[in-house]
Amino acid sequence: MPRRTGALALSLLVLASALGLPPSPASAATMPTGARSLEAVNYPGRFIRHFDYLGRLDPVTSGSTAQTKQDATFTVTSGLASPSCYSFQAANGMFLRHEDWRVGVEANAGTAQFRTDATFCAVDGSATGTVSLAPFNYPDRRVRHRDFGLWIDTYQDTAGFRADSSFRLTAPWTPKSTKGPVIPGLYADPHITNFNGRYYLYPTTDGYASWASPYYKAFSSTDLVNWTDHGVILDHGPDVSWADNSAWAPAVVAKNGRYYLYFSGGAASGDTGKHLGVAVSDSPTGPFRDALGRPLVRAGAYPGQAIDPMVFTDDDGQSYLYWGNGAAYVVPLNADMTSFDPAKVRTITTTGFREAAFVLKRNGTYYFMWSENDTRDEDYQVAYATGPSPLGPWTKRGVVLQKRLDAGIKGPGHHSVVRAPGTDTWYAAYHRFAVPGGNGTNREVTVDRLTFGSDGTINPIVPTP
Ligand code: FUB
């Protein structure tokens, strides 16, 4: 923190404390995401847990039942209402939220009300290394325990209140027994790629009714297991003049020493269609800026929705833009990566094509992949075709990723594929209904191996829980 900002923050804290006000946002704390339990500072051995859908502070020990331990384990995720705050997802898929000042757990309805009620901003707790949670929509309150129930109460500048509202993040009572999502929280439509030996994931932020999220984040990893959250890379509100919401299905490609992010978005009022745009950055983790100040493909310019862009660059350096919902399109991009000749747009809709076009090349064969059915349908799935060029013609080969009900996996789709650099090892990133408790707007992102048969066909991808 720069010295002047630090001094200002300190003076504000002193002033706030003198006035008996809660700590200002200047004292915002950060928390690691992932599975954790929260222990009361003043009642060591008692943890936040849910019981009958209400939040409580109960003793939990190594001898507690598996159910109690599970109810006292939460996955800390990026906040449903703000990426700079946090949400807490229980093992049953529900989120901690407040309602009528009580804290409980409930399934994410995707409404703005739910998302704000289920988002808490971290501030420093009463003891070093502890955290206090300020409701996103009631920053003058804190999550606190009272009579061993959990409430959001108005902040009081007393030692007692501060202790009742301070928690220590501990190792989870229930360690993860399955792989789960590779990035904690609700995300979808992952675009996975590798730049200079590092893997990057660019997803849609999920958990919004009608998929209304306004921003994209970037994540990176060296091993496809441990992912670093790089925060928001493009926010439709401040960054894109022609879009406010529906930040859907980004795809990022490196070219000309820069990074191009293709994305779609809708405006809050006036027009209901989704446009497709392109943003540019000098870094794979942004910030990205709208390259054109207008859409690259306007809603209605071609039949179907102008969504789900993807760029494939062939060995000769020519890049191709694919997109579409209901109909699939491809066009060679000009060298600037931000324009194309409309006369060269081709329709390449295959049987079953719904959306999420993805193209890769292996051993001289082009693979055109896509998602079938509706993303809200548990039968959402991935199919593919092969062809002799990036433009086709395409021969459908079949479905390679579909639901696996024995493992609780529904609606797997909108995938992308990456090759481990210098190898013939391939991985598919895809989304599915969050496990458990998810649906078509509460989805999670994971990665599984994609393998080829000796004849070049793609083997069915085995989705792992
Ligand atoms: O996430 C919003 C939309 O849902 C995507 O654009 C589609 O591919 C579907 O996954």
Image (cartoon, rainbow, N blue to C red):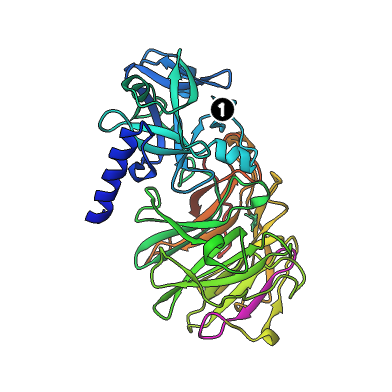
Q: In the image, is residue 153 part of the stretch drawn in magenta?
A: no
Residue for point 40% across, 60% down: 199
Toward the front, the furthest residue is 19
Category of crowding for the residue at label 1, using alpha-carbon neighbours closer than 10 angstroms: few (below 14), some (14–19), many (at least 20): many
Foreground: 280 or 129? 129
Foreground: 409 or 393? 409
Residue for point 72% across, 52% down: 374
The residue tagged 1 is 105
Choose top left, top right, bottom left or bottom right for residue 48: top left
Dominant secondary structure (helix, strand or loop) of the stretch shown in magenta: loop
Residue for point 52% across, 42% down: 464
Residue 168 point in image, percent of width and height: 33, 28
Residue 197 position (above or below residue 388): above
Q: SS of the residue at dot 1?
A: strand
Residue 128 position (above or below residue 402): above
Residue 141 point in image, percent of width and height: 46, 31
Residue 306 point in image, percent of width and height: 68, 68
Give amino acid for label 1.
Answer: Val
Residue 224 falls left or right of residue 464: left
Question: What's drawn in magenta, residue-wise?
Answer: 325-338
